[in-house]
Image: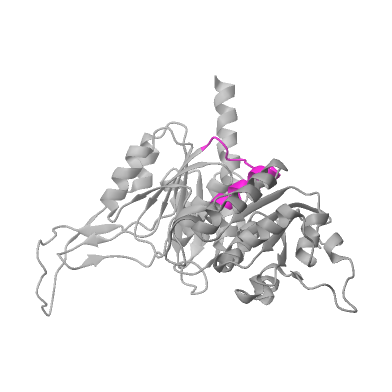
Amino acid sequence: MTDKESVVLVVSGSIAAYKAAELARALMELGLDVRVAMTRAAERFITPLTFEALTGGRVLRAGFPEPGEPPMEHITFTRGARLVLAAPATADLIARMAGGLADDNVTSMLLATDLPVIVAPAMNVMMYRHPATQSNIALLASRGVMFVGPEAGELACGDEGEGRLARIPQIITAVREKLSLGDDLAGRKLLITAGGTREPIDAARYIGNRSSGKMGVALAHAAARRGARVTLVAGVMDVEPPANVETVRVESAAAMLDEVERRFPGVDALVMAAAVADYRAEQVSGHKVKKTKRWDLPLVENTDILGRMAERRQSQILAGFAAETHDVEAAGREKLLRKNLDMIVINDVSRADIGFGADENEVTILTRQGAPERVTKAPKERVADAILDRLVVLINNRKRRGEAAG
């Protein structure tokens, strides 16, 4: 075990069991130590090795211990943890919990613990609506068990209705509430941009870039997890936006400017993680231009969104990104001052293992005061939290200065 706060994730035999791997990772991104317990049926859908690789810990399996294994693990496995989360929870597991059955290691553990319990059901709609299941859920709820979901929609079997596992952000929100985890952005409004822009040159072609949107989406997800009300202005992205943020889709730099301008008043901070095209075609052809040996394409400069917002801001914090290939810190500092930003995040896009399209990043965070903060190569979700840590300080300092002036 570690000295981190811990949760026990119980995985049962639903087709949604594969989502528990993503859930385990999301819990770890909260800074939690995740201990996984699996029913026998769960192991038919996903292997214990998957969770052992993800969490770095041993999985508690349903079979009672063999000689040489810890003999009382159904008692000791939850010690030091703060919460038990059953996700996905099948009708069978819910029934066994309601009935107090303890016929294997996992149900024995559930019966032996006095920790708070959250259950995220996943099953066929008819199973969920059955009076027996509803009675079991009501009984567990009366004992203090918290339920999250299920959602309605198309199920794996093809039926429609309640039964889908709640979305990961919804489950994470329930965990945060139950554990009273950090909410240092609660009540704050953040405007975040992500992805690349496409600037049309004719009916079929455009100028674009390699931005995947992963860093901006990670920032939006992390900010919402920390309590912020987030609006994500999303350009062209390779990833889906978080389910628990307001998302506005755009394609061109001009459209992104319009949406940012409209939403900028009243926000606490603007974080421009999008890779906005610097130039657009001076004239856009309404039809596809025929192929020629030479095509002279006059370009004009797009409006600098951050620069425009810097001119119009009142108390908002402005944070930008600088994708550089050499002299990255010097180039980033020059951009920080020239655009009158409060913070800039610099990354070296000449490296294939970080930056555009990669799942990991390595950045340097610069502000107007203090030493540069270097975040070594890490998943973009972790980098996002490091960026937000610095952003929270800037927002709070500006608020204190405003209160002192008032």
Instruction: Look at the picture and state if 85 lies above or below 296.
Output: above
Q: Quadrant of the C terminus?
A: top right
Q: In the shown orientation, is residue 338 left or right of residue 28?
A: left
Q: Position of residue 404 (x, y in %)?
A: 59, 23
Q: Residue at x 49, y 51 (%)?
A: 220
| Rendered view: 24 above or below 189 | below
373 displayed left or right of 228: right
Residue 288 placement: quadrant: bottom left
User: Which residue is painted at 48% across and 59% down in the image?
Assistant: 215
Query: Looking at the image, which residue sits at the far top?
Result: 406
Pick the residue in front: 343 or 231. Answer: 231
Q: Residue at x 26, y 65 (%)?
A: 207
For residue 278, above or below residue 394:
below
Does the magenta run of residues contain 180? yes
Q: Quadrant of residue 287?
A: bottom left
Say whether residue 45 is visible. Answer: yes
**Residue 89 vertical position relative to residue 229 in the rendered view, above or below:** below
Let me know if residue 89 appears in the view: no
Q: Nearer the viewer, residue 169 or 334?
A: 169
Task: Measuring from the top left, give residue 46's x and y in whole percent.
Answer: 61, 74
Residue at image coords 57%, 28%: 401
Quadrant of the image containing the N terminus? bottom right
Q: Which residues are magenta?
A: 170-188
Across the whole image, how many numbered discs are drawn on residues? Answer: 0
The image position of residue 36, as x and y in percent, is: 71, 65
Residue 48 belongs to magenta span:
no
Closer-to-camera residue (38/24): 38
